[in-house]
Amino acid sequence: MSCQLLKLARAQSPEKLIKMAFETLPERTLQAVFGTLHPKQHLILKQQHRRKVSMHCLADTLYYHQGAQLSRLGRWNDMTILQMQHELAKRGKLEEGEATTLSEWKLRLRLVCLVTAEKEAWRKAASARLEKRTENKKAWAAQLAAYDEIDKDLSEGALVEAEQHAIC
C-alpha cells in the first residue's frame, strides 16, 4: 500500500521536512506534531534529536495534508490513491476492506461525489444563514419603526399636554 510520493517524503532530511512543515501545515497541526503549544522553527531544528520527533510521522502528515489541500481545490486527478483513500476514510466513507478492492477511478469518483455533496450542503447552509440574517434585520427594522412611532406619539402627546397646561 505504499506510494512513491510518500517514499520520497519519508526519504527527505529532517531539516527539510521541518522546513516544509512550517511552510505548509496549520498552527494546530504543528502543535500536535511537535508536541508544544508554541512551535518555533529554529528551536525545533536545534532540538530535533532531543525532541524525538518522528520524521516518518511528519512526512506522513505533510503527504496527507497535501492530499487534503488537493481535494479542497478540486484537483482530484493530482491526488494519489493513498491520499484519496485517506480523505474518504477521514470522512467515514470508506470501509476497512474496501480500500484494496476499489480501483483508482472508483475512489476518485466517490471522492468527487462526496466533496461535491459537502460543498452543496455548505452552500445551502450558508444560504439559510443569510436568509435568517436578512429576516432578523427586517424584524429589527420593523421594531425600530414601531419604537419611533411610539416616540413620535409620546412627544406629540407631551406637546399637547404642555399647551393645555400653559393655557390653564
Image (cartoon, rainbow, N blue to C red):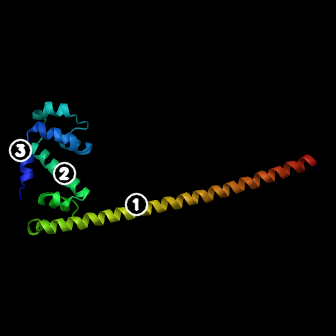
Secondary element type, mark 2: helix
Can you say whether 50 is above or below 21 in the image?
Answer: above
Q: Measuring from the top left, give residue 17's x and y in whole percent.
A: 13, 41
The residue that appears at 18% across and 42% down in the rendered structure is: 21
Secondary element type, mark 3: helix
Mark closer to the chain start, 2 or 1:
2
User: Given the current orientation, which residue lies at the most extreme right position?
Assistant: 168
Q: Measuring from the top left, give residue 85's x and y in whole percent.
A: 15, 61
Q: Are marks 3 and 1 in contact (CB under 8 Å)?
A: no
Q: Measuring from the top left, give residue 90's x and y in whole percent.
A: 20, 59
Query: Residue 24 versus residue 147: which sits nearer the camera?
Result: 24
Quarter of the image holding residue 144? bottom right
Dot label at residue 66: 2
Amino acid residing under circle 1: Ala
Q: Measuring from the top left, give residue 12's x and y in whole percent.
A: 8, 42
The residue that appears at 30% across and 63% down in the rendered structure is: 118
Q: Are marks 2 and 3 in contact (CB under 8 Å)?
A: no
Residue 82 seen in the figure: yes
The residue that appears at 10% across and 38% down in the rendered structure is: 14
Mark closer to the chain start, 3 or 1:
3
Amino acid residing under circle 3: Ala
Q: Is residue 105 left or right of residue 143?
A: left
Mark closer to the chain start, 2 or 3:
3
Dot label at residue 11: 3
Residue 94 seen in the figure: no
Amino acid residing under circle 2: Gln
Query: Residue 168 versus residue 42: which sits nearer the camera?
Result: 42
The crowding category of the residue bearing disc 1, from other C-alpha atoms within 10 Å (few below 14, some 14 to 19, many at least 20), is: few
Secondary element type, mark 1: helix
Q: Which residue is mark 1?
A: 126
Q: How far is disc 2 from disc 3 in space, using C-alphas?
A: 17 Å
Q: How far is disc 3 from disc 1 in space, using C-alphas?
A: 43 Å
